[in-house]
Image: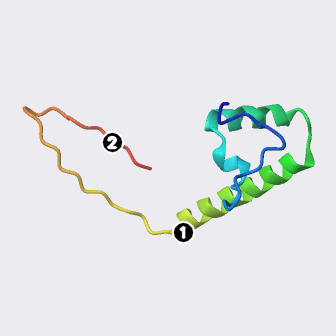
Amino acid sequence: MAMNENVPGVTPLPGRRAKPSRINLHPLHEAAMRIADLGLNRPKAKTKDLVGMLLTHGARAWRSTQPRAGIHLHVTAPGRRQPLKMRIL
């Protein structure tokens, strides 16, 4: 049985705590399930999207208030070539 199969009625072993099913899903399978949910207009999916958007927005707002970090990098190469090009925004 693949780890991504959604099998109703499967219970965890006695003495073990059940984990939320979202943790066990492979990222590609989870993405496919979310795409499939788009056409169904389920309220649960809308709620998850709203919560995810609010968490993402909050994390982005927090990062924007943090001081800028500077990076000083020395890289040597034979001749005067640029061995490394890096751009961090």
* Residue 70 place in picture, x, y as percent: 33, 61
Is disc 2 in contact with disc 1, using a CB cutoff of under 8 Å?
no
* Residue 42 place in picture, x, y as percent: 91, 43
Q: Which mark is residue 1?
A: none
Q: Is residue 9 above or below residue 57?
A: above
Secondary structure of the residue carrying numbered label 2: loop
Q: Residue at x 68, y 61 (%)?
A: 17
Secondary structure of the residue carrying numbered label 1: helix
* Residue 1 place in picture, x, y as percent: 67, 30
Q: Is residue 14 above or below residue 87?
A: below
Q: Residue at x 54, y 69 (%)?
A: 65
Identify the residue position indicated by label 1 in the image: 65
Q: Residue at x 68, y 33 (%)?
A: 29
* Residue 83 place in picture, x, y as percent: 20, 35
Which of these two is toward me, 45 or 22?
Answer: 22
Q: Amino acid at mark 2?
A: Met
Please report whichever mark, 2 or 1, sits nearer to the chain's N-terminal start: 1
Which of these two is toward me, 16 or 62?
Answer: 16
Q: Amino acid at mark 1?
A: Thr
Label 2 to label 1: alpha-carbon separation: 24 Å
Identify the residue position indicated by label 2 in the image: 86
